[in-house]
Amino acid sequence: MPGNRPVRVGIVGLEFGAEFIPIYQQHPDAEMVAVCQRTESKLHETADRWGVPKRYTDYGDLLADPDIDLVHINTPLQLHADQVVAALEAGKHVGCTIPMAVSVEDCERIVDAQRASGRVYMMMETTLYSREFLYLQDLYQRGDLGRIQFLRASHHQDMTGWPSYWDGMPPFYNGTHAIAPTLGIGGFQAEWVECLGSGSVFERMKSQYGSPFAIESTHIKFRDVDLGAEVTRHLWAVAREYRESFDVYGSIRSFEWAQTQDQRHVRYVGESAERVEAPDFAERLPEPIRRFTTGGVYTDEGESEHRSFVQGGGHGGSHPHLAHRLVRAVLGEVEPYPDAVRAANITCAGILSHESAMRGGDRVHLPEWTLTDRQPLMIALNERVEPPWRDVVAGD
């Protein structure tokens, strides 16, 4: 706990990570004190631009700095587990970009390290703080969706031109953008998965991870509720515009994501359909960081943002919400979401979906340590009896 002073932040990785520098600088309860990047020229270019005082090329040196309370990690996914565990063991609070890790064993290492350290860990999953997700969660909590009957999500992305370590990666090793919203809307947890692998990636890509599939599509059974989801992910060799989508089918209202970026989402009441746009939720944030829901840190100067920001359409205005939740969690005002156990449940649902696909679609259960008995009250919302949708339409 920082006490009455601001949470002092160090950011590791300055490609996508640079998007968060001015958010922390302008957050009333945070202080942006350090950045870390292996390439020294990139380190000083970014630090000079934003006036960050402390600069490290060695991650261990950053962790040894007593002036840093919180480490925000934005490095390649293969590095996440070791870097997160090292930060927790050094007594730092941690926010880390997705995924939590790329193996079930490494997810468990993080869960164990977080429990041993008592520090905050939060997986910085953008879809759980996007305006579309916040809009649907708000509808659900107000009862406007009724009982959720089914969820569907997808993440279609062509990774051509990304670093070579992505070549041939199993789609669900990086599936949290699609899995997280299906679980997060009601605080649900994945109990088991059954996954179909389909199609083929390029021959040159098959050897790196031993994965042949162009597309993986999984069914997720939720724990303690009669509900499930279908989630699809691809990285290569599929003709499709970038799309992170989230469909919710309720007994009163349903929502389907726009098919393409130039279209609008669709909301249904019974069989009646209307085009809708998710409202901005900037009012939930401290005033100085509200503007970051509608633009990246380079928007004002017309420069190109990181690929993930551009392809993801700015990640639905999620970045200031993520930073604000993480800072408040470090201050002890809220729980981090997703915390280590729930991040492991989300991430392992993807990793084990790939395992299921490689086993011809066998059912694979999530480990017990990815499940928590601390079920949120929102699950009870799915068990109530609501009026038929025709009665709701009359007063809509």
Image (spheres, helix red, strand yellow):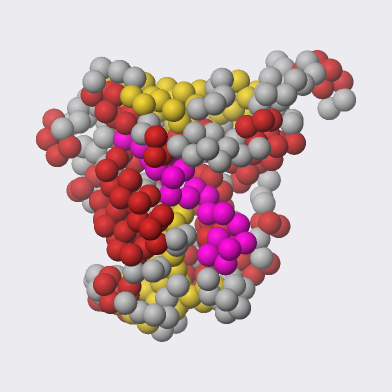
Residue at 30% over, 18% down: 362
Q: Residue furthest bottom?
A: 53
Farthest right residue in view: 395
Drawn side of residue 174 relative to residue 168, left or right: right
Among the 4 quarters of the image, the one containing residue 132:
top right
Residue 181: percent from left, percent from top: 52, 37
Q: Position of residue 390 (x, y in %)?
A: 80, 15
Q: Main secondary structure of the magenta part?
A: helix
- Residue 119 in sight here: yes
Q: Say if the magenta span includes residue 349.
A: yes
- Image coordinates for residue 204, horizontal then vertical, percent: 12, 35
Q: Is residue 151 left or right of residue 387?
A: left
Relative image position of residue 96 (x, y in whole percent): 40, 56
Answer with left or right where residue 94 lies relative to residue 209.
right
Rendered position, 181 above or below 98: above
Would you say residue 316 sits in the magenta stretch? no
Quarter occupied by the C terminus: top right
Please give the name of the residue rendered at 21% of the width and 41% of the height, measured from the top-left corner.
167
Point 82% across, 22% down: residue: 392
Q: Is residue 228 above or below residue 24?
A: above
Residue at image coords 39%, 34%: 368
Q: Which residues are magenta?
A: 328-351
Which of 330/165 is in front? 330
326 relative to 390, above or below: below
